[in-house]
Amino acid sequence: MKRFFCIITIAISTFLLAQRHEVGIFLGGANAIADIGNETYIAPTEIAVGGFYKRNLNERYSLRLNAAFGKLKMKDAESDEQYKIDRNLTRTNYVGEGSLIFEFNFFDFNGIHRNAHTPYLFAGIGGFSYKKQDLSIDLSTNDLGGTDMVTTATSGYDFAATIPFGIGYKYKFNYNWIIGAELGFRTTFTDNLDKGDPEIAINVLDNSLSQDEIDIIERQITDTYKIGNTNSNDWYVFTGLTLAYTFGRPPCYCD
């Protein structure tokens, strides 16, 4: 039994020491897919930067810890839809993301190769912070038109989950250096990247208002401040180049 545990311990230690590591950076552009702005899925207009650590499990499989930051700008003026052009809204947001990603190489790549290249797919789970805007509205009179009210906007940060996935292509040279290009989509669990679905707190100060009148005012206010389809969540996209350095003893890839 002791011999068995010794063998297991040595095997695990060898496995851990035998992993080949990568550290790298990402530089590119970002764009949002939201209720404000154009309908193009890949349209990087603002900067995106990031860094990553990767552990290669074998020639084709890797796990990657990813951190990224991007600026998102959404402009109705850049849309092909006439109603958006007429609306002419502009929103800006910033996202800071952390994720765990599984990567699959189509060709053998992670071993000792002076030169190698491969396309790859990736998918994972993550979370990101973003800037949000909430509204507090005080209604002081029985004004069904909603003109006699005080609106206070407050800004803050919120956190939401994301599912990153995408494709890329990379090339290894001189054994240890890797350059690549990557396109990554991020589905999110929020509809507020464009600040088009704010949380609205309505305080009714006039006790003479009936519940029906309050409901009418709330619907009018909601229609005024909510933008687009609030049942459809926003996405964002990172497109850019990567540069990585590999180090550590590679695994013994055995059949």
Image (cartoon, rainbow, N blue to C red):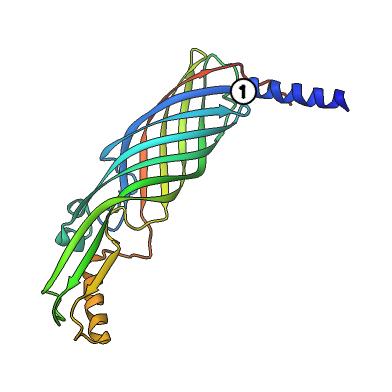
- Residue drawn at 38 percent across, 58 percent down: 233
Residue at 38%, 36% in the rendered image: 68
User: Dot 1 corresponds to which residue?
Assistant: 19
Q: Residues within 10 Å of mark 1 (few under 14, many from 20)?
A: many
Secondary structure under the numbered disc 1 in the rendered image: loop
Amino acid carrying label 1: it is: Gln
Disc tally is: 1
* Residue nearer the viewer, 186 or 41: 186
- In the displayed orientation, state which residue is furthest to the left: 148
Q: Nearer the viewer, residue 217 or 226?
A: 217
Where's residue 73, x and y in %? 24, 46
Q: Is residue 191 left or right of residue 60?
A: left
Q: x and y percent of residue 164 in the render?
A: 46, 44
Where's the C terminus, which quadrant? top right
The one of 68 and 88 positioned closer to us in this rendering: 68
Taking the spot 25% from the left edge, 76% from the top edge, the residue there is: 218
* Any part of residue 18 in sight: no
Residue 129 in view here? yes
Image spot of residue 16 (x, y percent): 65, 24
Above or below, comparing residue 167 to residue 133 in the picture: above
Q: Is residue 228 above or below residue 168?
A: below
254 on left or right of 77: right
The quarter of the picture where residue 215 lies is bottom left
Q: Position of residue 74 (x, y in %)?
A: 24, 50
Q: Residue furthest right?
A: 1
For residue 252, side relative to residue 22 (left or right):
right
In this view, 30 is above or below 139:
above
Q: Quadrant of the N terminus?
A: top right
Of the pair 57 and 207, the residue shown nearer to us: 207
